[in-house]
Amino acid sequence: ETGVTQTPRHLVMGMTNKKSLKCEQHLGHNAMYWYKQSAKKPLELMFVYNFKEQTENNSVPSRFSPECPNSSHLFLHLHTLQPEDSALYLCASSQALGDGNTIYFGEGSWLTVV
Amino acid sequence: DAKTTQPPSMDCAEGRAANLPCNHSTISGNEYVYWYRQIHSQGPQYIIHGLKNNETNEMASLIITEDRKSSTLILPHATLRDTAVYYCIVRYLFGGAQKLVFGQGTRLTINP
């Protein structure tokens, strides 16, 4: 238990569906992240939020839409995805500032697009 | 971004020390070295981090060379549950938040 909870753990959706992934952190952190891990590829940083403000969009297609209503919650809204978007989506959080602070990851949400 | 280089795979016998090397020759003076591991189908698990000095915690030890261009993660008594992909990462600050850029990591297999 890392203090970062992701739901659902598994999701199967059609290409025309709209779904959302949810992340909640109980660590009092100010920064939250979405990472994507495709099969046999390194983790790719997608989005960074610092104090609810998006600080980075790593050239992610607009069919992925993040939302950060507060420092404890992060969503990833999914719309008209492609089969190649099937992957493990990981949420993480950290203190925004300060040396040596650690990023903690959730267990991930396995997404399958059919 | 500082890049890291790790061997793609390693084997170690159960009960022995596992020593995982990492090269980060372009690291800057204020960048930390982090180690994570990922067991299949799970999120990455934090292991240890350091800046200049060697570090030890309940999971592992981290040895950083004096010039900071390389480091070694040591699992002192490896068990079968330590089989995982181990990532050596250099952290940097971007937009006020930390960024971790993952490479391919080292797939460590602990053999009985």
Image: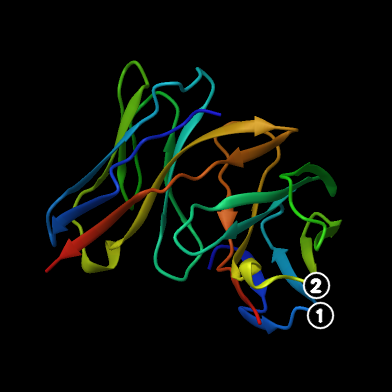
- Picture coordinates of residue B68, whole percent (x, y): 37, 21
* Closer to us: B53 or A78: A78
Mark 2 crowdedness (10 Å alpha carbons): few <14, some 14-19, many ≥20: some
Position above or below: B49 against A112:
above
Q: Amino acid at mark 1?
A: Thr
Position above or below: A42 against A110:
above
Left or right: A36, with B50 as reference point: right
- x 49%, y 30%: residue: B32
Q: Are marks 1 and 2 in contact (CB under 8 Å)?
A: yes
Residue behind mark 2 = A80
- Picture coordinates of residue A9, whole percent (x, y): 61, 78
> How many callouts does the rendering have?
2
* Mark 1 → mark 2, Cα distance in angstroms: 5 Å
Q: Amino acid at mark 2?
A: Thr
- x 23%, y 61%: residue: B109
Residue placed furthest toward the right: A69
The image quadrant that residue B88 belongs to is top left
Pointer 2 chain: A
* Closer to us: A16 or B38: A16
Left or right: B111, with A99 as reference point: left
Marks 1 & 2 on one chain: yes
Pointer 1 chain: A
**Sequence order check, earlier mark of 1 and 2:** 1
Residue behind mark 1 = A16
Badge 2 marks a residue whose secondary structure is loop
- x 54%, y 21%: residue: B30
Badge 1 marks a residue whose secondary structure is loop
Quadrant showing the N terminus of chain B: top right
- Picture coordinates of residue A48, whole percent (x, y): 73, 47
Position above or below: A41 against A108:
above
